């Protein structure tokens, strides 16, 4: 089973953009991944408790977007979030400090809080989209309302295992 942990938001602006450029828009809402998809041999009850305890440490739920970042390696366009108190980075690190997830942390890739708004694009498409979408996306206020611990189905659909409402 593949699982991930994300913070979700409901934003008309982001939903509209993602509906055009993100193939996962129909399966999962706009989100920030805190624990990236990884295998999990078995769901343990203690995981749910541990995740709920950690999410309580998030002091704020609203962040502003700062810039667009083309990810040429994975063919995605990332909308980067300002995290002045490092709240999101600390939350990401706390979740990966759990024994269930620690072996899968990619220390070679620095965590950049972001929302993917376009997927499966060529380099030139990413550059063009970044230019076109800059004025529509920079400075947006993004409020995360739910933490979702999900199983990822074979068709990429999200199956929630735990939902913690933040607001």
Image (cartoon, rainbow, N blue to C red):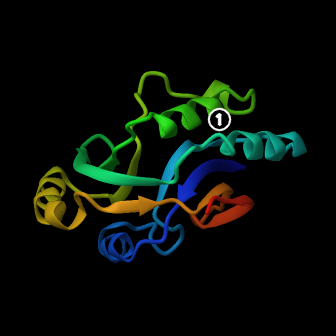
| Residue 1: image location, x then y, percent | 72, 49
Q: Is residue 12 above or below residue 33?
A: below
x 30%, y 75%: residue: 20
x 33%, y 74%: residue: 13
In what element is the residue under mark 1? Answer: helix
Considering the image in quadrants, where does the C terminus appear?
A: bottom right
Q: Is residue 64 left or right of residue 138?
A: right
Residue at label 1? 95
Q: Is residue 103 above or below residue 78?
A: above
Q: Quadrant of residue 142?
A: bottom left
- Mark 1, other Cα within 10 Å: few <14 / some 14–19 / many ≥20: many
Most distant residue in the right direction: 45
| Residue 87: image location, x then y, percent | 50, 38
Q: Is residue 159 left or right of residue 87?
A: right
Q: Quadrant of residue 25?
A: bottom left
x 34%, y 44%: residue: 82
Q: Is residue 80 left or right of residue 127?
A: right
Residue 76 appearing in the image: no
| Residue 68: image location, x then y, percent | 23, 51
Q: Is residue 16 above or below residue 37?
A: below
| Residue 75: image location, x then y, percent | 29, 50
């Amino acid at each position: 089973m593949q699982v991930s942990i994300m913070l979700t938001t409901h934003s008309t602006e982001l939903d509209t953009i993602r509906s055009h450029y993100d193939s996962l828009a129909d399966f999962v809402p706009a989100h920030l991944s805190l624990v990236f998809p990884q295998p999990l041999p078995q769901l343990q009850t203690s995981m749910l408790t541990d995740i709920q305890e950690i999410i309580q440490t998030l002091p704020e739920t609203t962040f502003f977007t700062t810039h667009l970042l083309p990810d040429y390696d994975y063919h995605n366009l990332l909308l980067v979030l300002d995290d002045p108190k490092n709240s999101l980075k600390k939350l990401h690190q706390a979740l990966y400090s759990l024994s269930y997830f620690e072996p899968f942390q990619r220390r070679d890739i620095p965590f950049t809080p972001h929302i993917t708004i376009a997927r499966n694009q060529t380099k030139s498409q990413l550059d063009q989209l970044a230019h076109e979408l800059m004025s529509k996306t920079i400075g947006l206020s993004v409020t995360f309302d739910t933490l979702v611990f999900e199983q990822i189905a074979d068709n990429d659909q999200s199956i929630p295992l735990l939902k913690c409402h933040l607001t």
